[in-house]
Image (cartoon, grey):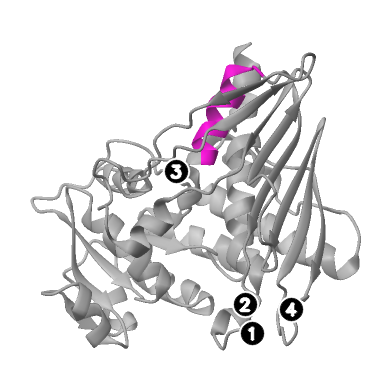
Amino acid sequence: MTTSTPHPIRVGLLGYGYAGKTFHAPLIRAVEGLELPIVGSSRPERVLADLSGVTVCSASEAATHPDLDLIVIATPNESHFPLAAAALRAGKHVVVDKPFTLDLAEARELVQIAREQDRLLSVFQNRRWESDILAAKDVLASGVLGDVVHFEAHMDRFRALVRQRWREDPGPGAGLWFDLGPHLIDLTLHLFGLPDSVLASFATLRPGGKTDDWAHVQLIYPGLRVILHATLLSSGGIARTLMHGTHASWAKHGPDLQEQQLVEGIIAPGTPGFGDDHDPGILMDGETGDRTAIPVPPADQVGYYRGVRDAILGRAPLPVSPESAIAVMAVLETSFASGQKGVLLRLPLREDERIAFQAKEPGVRQASKAAV
């Protein structure tokens, strides 16, 4: 799709909670060719304290505002589908924060609306631009591990106090796995493609907890097993990202620093020092046990919005495809069903969806194998 724009791409940001304030607003404003003139929020004083000169209106008004080209939806999860559908039908391109929708049926319907309206639709999967995932891609592509047989990714935090907020209160789209699961699932599909089946377990371990705060999910591939784990009662000590292969293993312990930098606001996105991670990955040779520190690539989540800009201008494909959004929702929905039933479940994707995903998201593992 090519869009002729005599002006910068005008972005409307819907929602100015943690995600809108911390991630979307600064990343959008860091991209040449994007401008942020309108924010949809019920708290105008908070928005204007950070973004002087923007217009603040309701999220529903911003979703269809005639002066906007791209709508970014960072509102509570249950509002993602209706706001995105309204924006698409109003002729806007749309970015939805994760989770894309509440279920697979909504995901399929939203992608169909985008196709009917000939608009671009993507989901904000910023973890693809974090240091450990960029490093994992390089290690996979190098072939130094041999055949990778085990992949493990953690998003573990220590938040023992149960807070009064929609993510921790029972309701649509609430709970830890709905919050962090889409990240872990997406990065796995990005690296390895589609799994065959899913086995999951969930628990509420914090005193007073009302939603899941511990998740352990296995994705089953031919010759590969994946463990995705998230908890709110971990003080650290476990590798954030880990791979075992027939020749060697690789692990990355320290967290990506971009979120901390965005919260602190000391280093602007896209400027020198932003995303620098001086904690290396460690390569462990299977035969000798030798350990080699490998510096990780510079990380920069601004790359996501540069990619969205270029896709709108017809210069490149979307950085995260709608086909991948459907696949992530299929895995997410299946994981909840598996956890509830306590059984291994196959992925409920149609054959055409599998083919479309494979065309857009071939996976680093498959691509590197094909190149050998």
Q: Nearer the viewer, mark 3 or mark 1?
A: 3
Name the residue that disc number 1 marks.
171
What element does badge 4 sit on?
loop
For marks 3 and 1 on the same chain, the one whose residue lies earlier in the sequence = 3
Residue 203: image location, x then y, percent: 80, 72
Q: Which mark is residue 129?
A: 3
Examine the structure image and report whether residue 286 is included in the region drawn in magenta.
no
Which callout, 2 or 4, points at the residue further toward the start of the chain? 2
Q: CA distance from mark 1 to mark 4?
A: 18 Å
141 vs 120, left or right, is right
Mark positioned earlier in the residue sequence (3 or 2): 3
Asked whether disc 2 touches disc 1, contact meaning CB atoms under 8 Å apart, the reply is yes
- Residue tagged 4: 206
Using residue 337 as the reference point, say whether residue 139 is left or right of it: left
Residue picked out by circle 2 = 174
Report the Cα–Cα distance between label 2 and label 4: 16 Å
Q: On the rendered image, what quadrant is the N terminus found in?
A: top left
Q: Residues within 10 Å of mark 3 (few under 14, many from 20)?
A: many
Task: State yes or no: discs 4 and 3 in contact (Cβ < 8 Å).
Answer: no
Residue displayed at 88% across by 54% down: 344
Name the image quarter holding the C terminus: top right
Rounded to the nearest angstrom, the CA distance separating label 2 from label 1 is: 6 Å
Tell me the element at label 2: loop
Q: Earlier in the sequence, mark 4 or mark 3?
A: 3
Q: Amino acid at mark 1?
A: Gly
The image shows residue 325 at horizontal and vertical percentages of 55, 54
Which amino acid does the dot numbered 3 rest on? Trp
* Label 2: few (<14), some (14–19) or many (≥20) C-alpha neighbours in 10 Å: many
Q: At x 22% / y 47%, what residue is drawn?
A: 3
Q: Residues within 10 Å of mark 4 (few under 14, many from 20)?
A: some
**Dot placed on the residue nearer the N-terminal end, 1 or 4:** 1
